[in-house]
Image (cartoon, coloured by chain):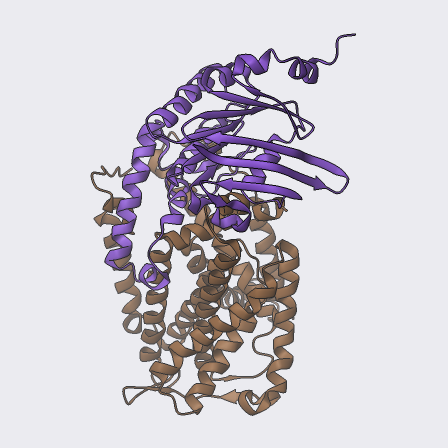
Chain colours: A brown, B purple
Amino acid sequence: MRIVFKTNYMQDIRPWKDRYQLSLYLILLAVVAAAPWWLDAFYLGELTNVLIWAIAGLGLMILTGHTGQVSLGHAAFLAFGCYANIALIEAGVPFLIAFPLAGILTGIAGVTVAIPALWLHGIYLAIFTMALSILMDDIIVLSEPITGGVAGKYVGGVEIFGHLVDRWGTPDQFFWLVLIVTVLVTLGYINLLRAPLGRSFIAVRDSEVSAQAMGIDIARTKMISFALSCAVTGWAGALMGLFAGAFNNETFSVLISIQLLMMIVIGGLGSIHGAFLGAIVIGFLPQFLSISKEYAGALFGGNTVAIPGLEFGIFGMILIAFILFEPMGLYGRWLKIRTWFELFPFYRKDMFKRQKSYLRTERLR
Amino acid sequence: MSLLEFENVTLKFGGLTAVDDLSFEVLEGEVFALVGPNGAGKSTVFNLISRFYDPYAGSIRFDGHDLLRVKPSGVAAYGVARTFQNIELFEHATVLQNLLVGRHQHRKTNLLSELLFLPSARQQEIENREKVEEIIDFLDLQAYRDKMIAGLPYGVRKVVEVARALATDPKLLLLDEPASGLSVEETSDMRWWIDDIRRQMGITVLMVEHDMGLVSGVSDRVLAMADGAKLALGSPAQVQSHPAVIEAYLGKAS
């Protein structure tokens, strides 16, 4: 176990514990950034997909993981970001301006939605946001001039400094674009968590009454959380649109919302790592299933049958298993494994024993 | 000089009068205790000061300001900090983070400077840390600095809650049963801390407490309440021997 001898407040304020930890993350970043050289085109596409999901996960994590407000409607904001981005590009705005703007517009949309949502807690908020997700489908169909309605939209690449970046034409460049956005969002998130605003989110999540007594304006904090969460989700949506190349009103269905929420629960609520770990599970599960189906087919001699809904079925089972056995998610499990090795042989089973409270705010009403 | 003034405050929940025409004032620099049987309205008085409830009638003034015009989240900015009867800490955060939340009302940075963590945000974090470390030293919480609240024993949580309230730099500290559930040693620690908070930090303390040993040990004046109304006000000894107080606790001698 590495013990850091602290002599300076900055050692707690900066995001890394020591140089060893910093170098690990830098190596990870370098290895991922070099992916186009060591991955074939198919898996590079999958990795890009995972990163986009991770951005979306970070978006929802701000709201659900750190502010304690469940949202089953984040697909609506994915859609909003996606269509806003495309609409701006089609209006002639260059991508480098359209893309940030799409996120900001989604954030503003999020605040508008947040105003009625401020009165709602827990399950009621979940229902409200889920309704929003369903409603978005109709809104997209109705605003056909912008969104293309049921026929949907097709996008080619985007132009960055006169250079065409396209998912199919130049997968390497598209991957790096996604990676840059991922890194920027993650850095912003890390900064948020070590600043007063991030702590006020956690305060609102854990106890609204005492947050209020500490001078935190609950409504305002929730609104900022919605805004940031939706902005990040909007960016993920914009990238998702570019990645998919074609989308319509059914692309961002309520199932995507549920998948997103499941993703951060599996990854581990209330941690940045959780969003990434969850995205890896979500991103690679379909591939893993199809590969294991082939193996199963070869093993039992039968031909591979397509079972409809298999993916969601397995996904649901994984979720149930996590909620029952590891409510802290993959990241929580990793922390336990790491502590076990660090403290060997002194690890105790109840070291991570906590009150199992997912949404403590509910209890206070 | 009076810091907090209650003037004919009445609060009703439907047909129940929780606080009944209550008037008292807390002087600057004193330790003022509220005692009374369960349901007497002591915690309700705290919640009125925190602005969780709007009184039915009467006025509450703090440090020359009309507190009733302040919203609940604005009370802290005037210099009122509090603890809760059933500890309300931020469970899934460390002790340090909890205390830093107490510094929230002194926040000077905006969203953008925090997202980019500009030098101003860093400077503010260092200043917050210095303040918080003073309190950690004062209340002997060094050993728990980086521990999660969820894993801490009850007695420590009580102290952390006091620490978090102190981190806001209050003029008036409201302690809701600071010694409930504490062991004899912990209670006597709490007693010295309350004494030090008043003497060293110059903070006025208003507390609700059932432990009469603690009350008579630290408080200058005691207000006894029953059914939301004032029974007796005076020094701890005066209040304890007041016939109305004895009657409220023990019943009328037949």
Q: Is residue A62 above or below residue B49?
A: below
From the image, which quarter does the N terminus of chain B lie in? top left
At x 32%, y 78%, the residue is A172
Pick the residue in front: A338 or A193.
A193
At x 45%, y 88%, the residue is A155
- Residue A191 is drawn in which quadrant? bottom left
- Residue A187 is drawn in which quadrant? bottom left
Pick the residue in front: A200 or A192.
A200
The picture places residue A148, in percent across and down from the top left corner, at 56, 90
- Res. A263 in view: yes
Q: Is residue A173 above or below residue A110?
A: below
A298 to the left or right of A163: right
The picture places residue A267, in percent across and down from the top left corner, at 48, 55
- Res. A306 in view: no
Q: Residue furthest top?
A: B254
Q: Residue furthest right?
A: B254
At x 26%, y 46%, the residue is B126
The picture places residue A61, in percent across and down from the top left corner, at 47, 59
At x 43%, y 43%, the residue is B93
Pick the residue in front: A29 or A234.
A234
- Residue A139 is drawn in which quadrant? bottom right
Image label count: 0
Q: Is residue A5 above or below residue A231?
A: above
Q: Is residue A85 above or below residue B50?
A: below
The picture places residue B220, in percent across and down from the top left corner, at 47, 20
